[in-house]
Image (tube, rainbow, N blue to C red):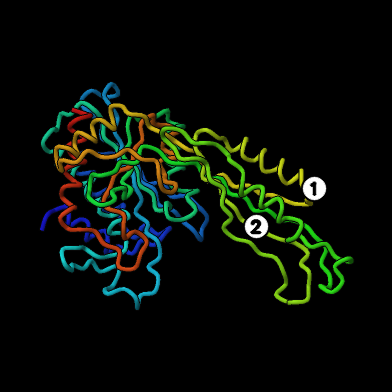
Amino acid sequence: MSRTLQLTEQLIACRSVTPDDGGCQALLAQRLELLGFQCETLIAGPEDFRVTNLWALRRGSAGDDGTLLAFAGHTDVVPTGPLNQWRSDPFVPTHRDGKLYGRGAADMKTSLAAMVIAIEEFVINHPQHRGSIALMLTSDEEGPAVDGTVRIVERLQQQGVRLDCCIVGEPTSVNRVGDMIKNGRRGSLSGRLTVKGVQGHIAYPQLAKNPIHLAAPALAELVAVEWDRGNDHFPPTSWQVSNIHGGTGAGNVIPGELVIDFNFRFSTESTPASLKERVHAVLDRHKLEYELAWTLGGEPFLTRTGSLSEALTKAIRSETGLAPELSTTGGTSDGRFIARICPQVVEFGPVNASIHKIDEHVAVADIDPLKNIYRRTMENLVL
């Protein structure tokens, strides 16, 4: 059994449903400290939702003058779902048909194991490397993401630390390891719209005010808006309703209010301020009485072609023969926080077809190539 596979299995066996770390970070920190890493654990969050964060740093021989390359990821996993639908215990790493099964196998404990073993191999082979290497981990990526990576970033900002490059180990590959790198993500802006009406008997509409009827024309207009046309790196901004509720459950009552949840996934062609302004303009034009609460999940970020993407692409080509596609598709990631202190942030990891699903898995044959790609990238950047 390869060392990377062995460590992946150890991590899967840690029951780390968000926000619990399950001992993953202590296991990894112990290995890194043997290599000369300085490890700092940061506990954050309320008593009933404690988040564990780890920042580990090894300075190269050039001190502050060399490239600072960070690896980043999360040790928490999503809940398992119905256990009786899993073919094996999700926290007992299990092999079937060349695949390793377990919660977190793809998202993202294989990446974490590959990163740490790659770092071990690199440091052992190049103990006097010039650039510095860091590892940034959280147990709050699959949760609210308010006391995780963002807290590490805030601490580093206070200390004046700035990263040069960062690889986030999200599962980005589509069909084969190495076919896709995420070099950015769209922003996420959510809103909860409450449209006010007057409750009444459905047989006497003149004595009531139906918020569903009042809101329908405004919703139709919002659906039809072209928010922007995107650009060479991002698709056009989209607006989608995710939940809608109005009514008491009775069939003879006009509701007194309508609650609508919606979300923007927006490109760099739009800003949160511009999107908010345009939504309010539509609602006001339809003379609705409403309340609107906004939540900014994350700003968009983009890493243009540069030393990091070139080093990673070269490593992928050397290991697999593939020419990876650069993409900004998919949801949000902690890259949005890291981009505040790092000009080059990309995401790269294993095939993502089974993430968050029952019987999550990763191909065993992909594990060591992923580790080798991470190691080759270090060799391309920090020697």
Badge 1 local density, few (<14 within 10 Å), some, or many (20+)?
A: few
User: Label 1 amino acid?
Assistant: Lys
Q: Residue furthest top?
A: 65
Q: Which mark is residue 287?
A: 1
- Residue 253, quarter of the rendered image: bottom right
- Residue 184, quarter of the rendered image: top left
Q: Quadrant of the C terminus?
A: top left
Q: Which mark is residue 260?
A: 2
Judge depth for marks 1 and 2 and give the one in front.
1
Q: How many marks?
A: 2
* Secondary structure category for the residue under label 2: strand
Q: Which is nearer the N-term, disc 1 or disc 2?
A: 2
Residue 199 lies, in percent from the top left, at 81, 67
* Inter-mark Cα distance, 1 to 2: 17 Å
- Residue 179, quarter of the rendered image: top left
Side of 83 where 336 appears, left or right:
right
Residue at horizontal 35 percent and vertical 31 percent from the top: 344
Residue 122 lies, in percent from the top left, at 16, 38
Residue at horizontal 42 percent and vertical 44 percent from the top: 334
* Secondary structure category for the residue under label 1: loop
Side of 119 where 357 appears, left or right:
right
User: 137 above or below 103?
Assistant: above
Residue at horizontal 72 percent and vertical 69 percent from the top: 247
The front one of 66 and 276 is 276
Residue 39 lies, in percent from the top left, at 31, 42
Residue at horizontal 59 percent and vertical 53 percent from the top: 262
